[in-house]
Image: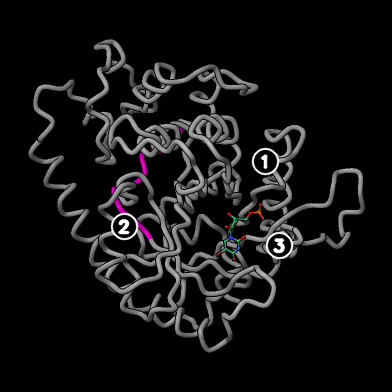
Amino acid sequence: NHVSEQSFEERATTTSHPLSSYLFRLMALKKSNLCLSADVSTTNQLLSLADSIGPSIVVLKTHYDLISNWDYNPTTGTGARLARIARRHGFLIFEDRKFGDIGNTVQMQYTEGTAKIIEWSHITNVNMIPGKAAVDALAEAAIRWRERKQYEVKTDISVGTPRAESIDSDGEDDTVTPIPESNLEIERAGRKASIVSITTVSQHFEPVNSPRSHEDYEEEVFEGIEEAPMDRGLLILAQMSSKGNFMNAEYTSACVESAREHQGYVMGFIAQESLNREPGDAFLNMTPGCQLPPEQDDEDAEIQGDGKGQQYNTPAKIIGLGNDIVIVGRGIIFAADPVREAERYRRKAWEAYEERIA
Ligand code: 5BU
């Protein structure tokens, strides 16, 4: 359809959602429409995966409740550390929380409780089974959160800690980690870049098995990538990849309707096909259930499911159907060389996109 033929650069300028616009620009810049589903079991596995695959992806999807030792500390915990890695490599974080309760409960689950998802995850998603009120409630919570954040940044509530907010312009609270004065001086591409993240990450990290040094990433990635805006976005779960799921056409249409009602907050869908159906629609479609056949095999070979209901399609098929971003978990994580495999997925998905808009 109309939207699938537009380039990501074009869509960055036409979307009304600030985070979608940022993401489209990121996609064009990194030549990537790949999301890694980082389904691992420990904080260290999650953070080193994020650091090593970071250059290939534009979104990293989490299930925070799979992490056995998730650290809930808002400034030094797992979410905050992941957010710093995201800032350094230039990708967005998407907590695949699939909220599915009454409005009041989802608001509290989103902004309060143990994980405080809204603090570290740019994007989350909702299962619309309870009705549209869940989307309304999450949208309201995001607006309130943003107002509070803006107030905190404006009034500099972090009294007594090093002033890092001039660097950390997305408003996420980095200010507790002490930052050596010299690091604040470094300027890149006309703006104070996330050098601060490199310092804090190397302070916290055991060596990661990344093929390139931090300096390389910085040179390569930071030219042209600005901080993500202090906005939050939602994806509506409109279609699933699993066999025999109950999301029928009527359900999917209700999801599209709800998205149209909240264009400042809803970025788009988790779906198996593009759900931009009417001329005014300009949503993002992200698609799980993606694997490639092994490198030596026939590229068009059918891919078996996982024996637990998951069904797979190739990046070429998924992107060809008008979806924008492929979500890949075990296809990359379980590969002998995940960094190399991530690049293979990135290349395939990107080629499919280029073919689509040609
Ligand atoms: P896989 O290892 O690539 O199969 O992982 C897929 C991920 O996407 C996993 O985290 C699922 O929870 C998630 N997922 C999915 O597979 N299918 C769906 O329809 C939705 C999410 Br929604």
Question: Which is the main secondary structure of the residues drawn in magenta?
Answer: loop
**Mark 2 crowdedness (10 Å alpha carbons): few <14, some 14-19, many ≥20:** many
Q: Which residue is mark 1?
A: 333
Instruction: Assess whether mark 1 and mark 3 are in contact (beta carbons under 8 angstroms).
Output: no
Q: Position of residue 238 (x, y in %)?
A: 52, 74
Depth check, front residue: 221 or 13: 221
**Residue 86, quarter of picture:** top left
What is the CA distance from the residue labelled 1 to the residue labelled 2? 27 Å
Q: Position of residue 294 (x, y in %)?
A: 85, 46
Residue 16 vs residue 107: left or right? Answer: right
Residue 137 vs residue 217: left or right? Answer: left
Q: Amino acid at mark 2?
A: Tyr
Q: Amino acid at mark 3?
A: Lys
The extreme front residue here reads 68
Image quarter in which the C terminus is found:
bottom right
What is the CA distance from the residue labelled 2 to the residue labelled 3? 28 Å
Q: Which residue is mark 2?
A: 110
Mark 2 / mark 3, whichever is N-terminal: 2
Find numbered disc 1 in the image and state the secondary structure of the residue it sits on: helix
Please check the rendered image and state whether residue 183 is part of the magenta-colored stretch, yes or no. Answer: no
**Residue 59 visible (yes or no):** no
The magenta span reads 223-233
Image quarter in which the N terminus is found:
bottom right
What is the CA distance from the residue labelled 3 to the residue labelled 1? 18 Å
Mark 3 / mark 1, whichever is N-terminal: 3
Find numbered disc 3 in the image and state the secondary structure of the residue it sits on: loop
Mark 1 / mark 2, whichever is N-terminal: 2
The disc placed on residue 308 is 3
Disc 1 within 8 angstroms of ligand 1 (CB): yes
